[in-house]
Amino acid sequence: MYKQIPLSLNYIVLIIIALAYIVPFLWLLSNSLKTDQELFSTPITWIPKHFAFSNFKDAFTQFPFFEYLRNTLIIVGCNLIGVAVSNTLVAYGFSRIQWKGRNVIFIFVLATMMLPFQVTMIPLFVLFTNFGWIGTFLPLIVPTFFGNAYYIFLLRQFFIGIPKDLSESAKVDGANEFYIFSRIILPLSKPVIATVLIFSFIHDWGDFIGPLVYLSNNKLYTLSLGVQQIMGATDPQWPLLMAAGVAMTVPVLVIFFFMQKQFIQGISFTGIKD
């Protein structure tokens, strides 16, 4: 019989794993506070000799950071609404309502997860060009109101785990499906909804290929494209690039830090159910 692993050893392993994940961000933070000369000096230094906090000021002023931030927040905010509305409704239909061909259609929905964006990019571009949407936010926002296979799967699996007796009792009292969905299912599904919204935020906040394909006007650029402009310059200002990278990473870390409980619950409670 195997002996139980000491608790201290578990903590040591977890600390080592945590350091492996946090070291790249600490290196990014360190470089964002260095001068251009110190950034490329050898040997490398983890702690800057002179903290160049002006890098953050320059990153916010030497290119339209806040304009790109506004564009990013518009896309992210609209997509969060689209994800919350469309995916919960579709998942409810696949999990709580009996109708002919439900499981077959659900398999087709899951099959779309095997198609990467690179495969559908050209057909979608042609479609949105015919709609006259290229050069606007619409190609990045409207599709989220039609559901996402992965999010639908997570929500459906969670909804299946909610006892059906709650719905049956509500129906006996005269409640319709929308009342059951909005007043019973959604309040019990806050962890998985928070998980889906976190996934959506992380994807849309750092999305690069979508804005690159659909946004032809630099006044509509997102932060990811704005940072790419710094990299693509003839003389890239690397400290400013590092500072902008820190500014883009911090919101994701803050949101995950404050919502990690809901995130973990949503993942752990979403199992494979029949």
Image (cartoon, rainbow, N blue to C red):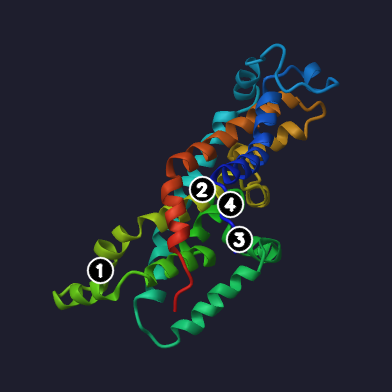
> What is the distance, in whole Å, between disc 1 and disc 4 at their CAs?
47 Å
> What is the distance, in whole Å, between disc 2 and disc 3 at their CAs?
43 Å
Residue 84 vertical position relative to residue 107 in the rendered view, above or below: above
Residue 6 vertical position relative to residue 186 in the rendered view, above or below: above
Question: How many neighbours does mark 2 have within 10 angstroms: few (below 14), some (14-19), or many (20 or more)?
Answer: many
Residue 68 vertical position relative to residue 178 in the rendered view, above or below: above
Kindly identify the amino acid type of the residue bearing the numbered disc 4.
Ile
- Between 64 and 11, the one lying in front of the other is 11
Query: Given this view, does label 2 or label 3 mark the residue nearer the observer?
Result: 3
- Which part of the image, by quadrant, shows the C terminus? bottom left
Q: Which mark is residue 201?
A: 2
Instruction: Find disc 4 in the rendering and name its residue.
Output: 5
Kindly identify the amino acid type of the residue bearing the numbered disc 3.
Tyr
* Residue positioned 63% across, 59% down in the render: 129
Quadrant of residue 86 within the rendered picture: bottom left
Residues under numbered marks 2 and 3 in contact, where contact means CB atoms less than 8 Å apart: no
> What is the distance, in whole Å, between disc 4 and disc 2 at their CAs?
38 Å
- Between 141 and 156, the one lying in front of the other is 156
- Which part of the image, by quadrant, shows the N terminus? bottom right
Q: Secondary structure at mark 1?
A: helix
> What is the distance, in whole Å, between disc 2 and disc 1 at their CAs?
27 Å
> What is the distance, in whole Å, between disc 3 and disc 1 at their CAs?
49 Å
Where residue 136 appears, as percent x and y from the top left, is 56, 49
Instruction: Find disc 1 in the rendering and name its residue.
Output: 180
Q: Earlier in the sequence, mark 3 or mark 1?
A: 3
> What is the distance, in whole Å, between disc 3 and disc 4 at their CAs?
9 Å
Instruction: Find disc 3 in the rendering and name its residue.
Output: 2
Q: Earlier in the sequence, mark 4 or mark 2?
A: 4
Find the residue positioned furthest to the top.
50
Where residue 186 appears, as percent x and y from the top left, is 32, 61
* Residue positioned 41% across, 75% down in the render: 94
Q: Secondary structure at mark 4?
A: loop
